[in-house]
Amino acid sequence: MKHRTVLLLLLGLVQYSTAQVADRETYLKEFDQRVAYVTSFYDTMQTAGYYQAAVRYARNRDVARADKMFAEMLREPRGDMFWMIPSLGAYLVGKDKMSAETRALVRNAWKTYAPYRGDTENHWCMYYAALYLAAEQWPNLPGSEWYNGKSSDENLREAREYLIEWIRITTTIGQGEFDSPDYFPEYAIPMILLSHFAKDPDMKTRGTMMADYIFADFAAEHLDGQYIGGFSRIYQPAVYKPLLSGGSAFAYLYFGTGQPTNSGWIVIPALCNYRLPEIIYSIAVDRSNTIIHKERKRVRNVIRFGTEKNPPVYKYSYITKDYGIGSLQGGILQPIQQHTWGVRYMYGHPYTTIFGLHPYWSGYELGMFFPEEVKTLIADVVASKGTYNNPDKWTGGSPFERTFQHKNTLLVLYDIEPGTTTEHINGFFPRNLEERIVDPSGWIICKAGDTYVGWFPLQEYIWKEEFETPANSLSDIGRPQLERVKETGNWRLRSYKLQNGYVIEVRSKSEIGSFDNFKASLRKRIPKAALVPGKVSVQYTTLGGDRMQFGFPDKRTLNGKAIDLSKTRLFDGPFLSADVGSEKLMMKYKGMKRVLDFKTIKISE
Amino acid sequence: MKSIRFFIVVMILLATSAPSLAQKSTVYLSVLSTKLFVVGAANPQTGIFYRSTSDTGWKHTGPPNIRAFGFDVHTPSRGSLLAIASGNGVHQSQDGGKTWKITTGWEITEVQSVVIDRNDRTFMLCTTPYGVFRTLDGGASWRECNSGIREKFTSSVIIDQKNSNLLYCATDDGVYRSENRGDSWQRTGLAVGGGRVVVQHPTDSNTLIVGTENHGIYITRNSGATWDKTEAGLDHSTFYTIVYDPTNPQVLYAGGYVTGVYKSTDGGQSWVRKNDGLTTLNIHSLAVDPTNGNRVFAGTHGGGVFESDNAGSTWRSAGLHGSQVWTISVQPF
């Protein structure tokens, strides 16, 4: 414990020092310190677990206990791909130190325990990366030695085919479960394992390249441990307390940002030899210049109610040293956990965000993506994701929501069908804002440190103060707990008008000067809206003087010129560029360059 | 005279013992899920369960945690060949469930149903959200065969009893027919979409019946050229399962979303509800014992399985409480 305190003190200094871009030597030294801190939680933990065992093997400390942990854990394997990845990761880390009996137990588990392959991209990615590595570990075995009846060769071939196809589609039309703060680990860990442990040189390189790829994707939209923009999937409470997400744990370990964490997600990666390339680290932490970053992703496989399997997702992010605002175009792009837009900023952990949504749910939405019966899917989903049909939920996309972003101005419109779930929209305003002023001009004007946020509701609304559920405050092990009694609640803006919308303006002190100046500027900018069913639109001139016209659902005009989202490149920003279909990503930062060419499986610098 | 008396006694004994022999059918069912299923969690056992009709306890066979939507039992081999349609693909057993192999690859996923040709065990079809796939070599290789199908989400496929080249499938935009084992498909004359299940009359192969999402039940008597809606007595519109009583094709049962069980005794012209004893009305699967038409099974969404010994007049729970019983089959062995 004393050791960990020393590490934490050291890391406090490290955190401070990494506000600037560290040189490579310093970065690697600090990375090792973070590895030591993260793993320090697990090397003395007595409860059985794969992370605890892995650290013991890696440190060559109390190996006998690690063997016993494996025996205990393998008595009744469970968890499907969430078993495959950590158990195999721990095995690969420790196989040279574990007993022959333990190795035999692991082998036997792959014969007798049949994991479910899952029904979505992160499941398949974990499943096949683990299966690939397992088939390499135990070659030339007949089908009778594997849980699925396939031989080692068959498993290796199938896993390889899937992984190559996943890489191909991701680098041509984008990731499906894209930019998910909560599901980042589910992609990063399999790729890091492939990078370290794959025996096949090509697959090893592919793993390294895809780890680079998803880290670069995160880095370009990163601010102090937070993912910026719209996301395919995010859970409550991470949606309003951003550093709680698994992705933030990776930001801590690899970027040195955010907060120290004891997240188990990063234990196996911390024990692997994958190191973030200097250019990706630099892209992640250098916020000396404002960034406009655009991306094209894809919708998760649409299996009903649509003719296109993977329609495009268009993402726009604007990031400064103080804040980031990002958005997806709106509509149903992912089931259940979509985050269509949000502002996130440096000030005021843990509540560093403002966002809004139409809390929609339906069997139609679920039926688009899940093969079970449309009419019973809501009940099935609510059984595991209890907020799905809650009118107060903070996650989810809506077919009745669209956005139009230009720089740090965002227009959001709703044309909600009567009778749908639900007939209101919500806005999240955290409790710890320094100012939340309801201005007579109609603007709601907020101050969060050096970040100022203006929100102009196009319809009447009410405020509701609300507290989190105790379950949320108890779930984040090792993180600051809420002082529930002393704190006031967060604020919910609610508007019951079906034809609705708002204008968001975000500026920082360095962009616009004082908060008073921001307020005065906003008062001169009153949007003009038409809000009748089937004809919802808004016109607005931004604080920067750009004229935006937006007609629901998809008529976007900037300074008189129509915006064609379909021309959005796969990556388009100062740091990352890639064309749709290219299978190639170019990273640039100052004098550095790194190109990942997935067609030739080559990295060039 | 003695031998004649002995023959008569033997015949009487055989006749009186026939019902008990008939009771030794085997019920198979697939449990897709149980309450509170979460991927990656410690979930209750799911998959394929079976028992003798004269028994009460269910036994499990095959992988336990694979999201089993459907299955097929190869009747001529008395169940030595089994196939499961699951989230992981198509699992096959060649030895009555002792050993299993996934015969499909990564690209075939969330398999909704699988059928084995009764006359050629190397010919199988499976349906998925991405359409129909086929093997002609017993599962050694599978290929997509969706030519002509517009909306690919396919819930159900059948092989004509007399002509293995002739197939029908129920997809999101209706019912399709193939005359070449799935090389190409033509949409039948069914005017509505939302096809969920298509079944064929036990003896008249030109007669088929389809259950749909939101559009009720339709019958064709000319192999799909024209369809007539059957409405008399039906108060619901979403049907996931329809079965003929193999012992009397005038009798049918149908079930779906909060429908309970509907029964027809006139070949599907009219229906009456038969829910006495059912504690859940969300029906996903039905099956009739081919050796005893009075014995009917109903699989529910979340309420386990129910059994009737009097052709649906009354039902009692047959266990697997909390289960989503996606498919049921009763085999005469």
Image (spheres, coloured by chain):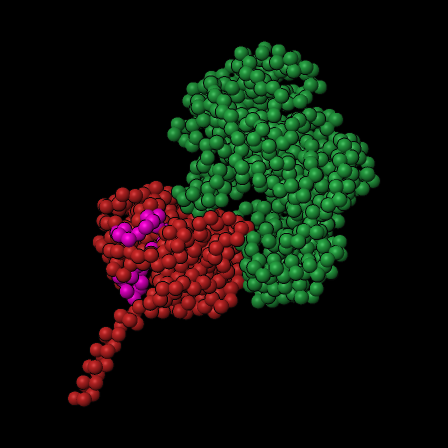
- Farthest left residue in view: B1
Residue B141: tell me if it is visible: no
B196 left or right of A477 in image = left
| Residue stretch in magenta | B274-298
Counting from the top left corner in percent of width and height, residue B108 is at 52, 53
A573 left or right of A454 in image = right
- Measuring 31% from the left and 63% from the top, which residue is drawn there? B289
Counting from the top left corner in percent of width and height, residue A200 is at 71, 56
Note the chain letter of the red one: B
Vertical position of residue A48 compared to residue A315: above or below: below
- Measuring 52% from the left and 43% from the top, which residue is drawn there? A301
- Measuring 28% from the left and 53% from the top, which residue is drawn there? B277
B41 left or right of B125 in image = right
Q: Is residue B275 magenta?
A: yes
The tint of chain A in the picture is: green
Counting from the top left corner in percent of width and height, residue B51 is at 39, 65
Q: Is residue A446 magenta?
A: no
Query: In front: B125, or A66?
Result: A66
Residue A131: tell me if it is visible: yes
Vertical position of residue A571 compared to residue B99: above or below: above
B190 left or right of A183 in image = left
- Measuring 21% from the left and 78% from the top, which residue is drawn there? B12
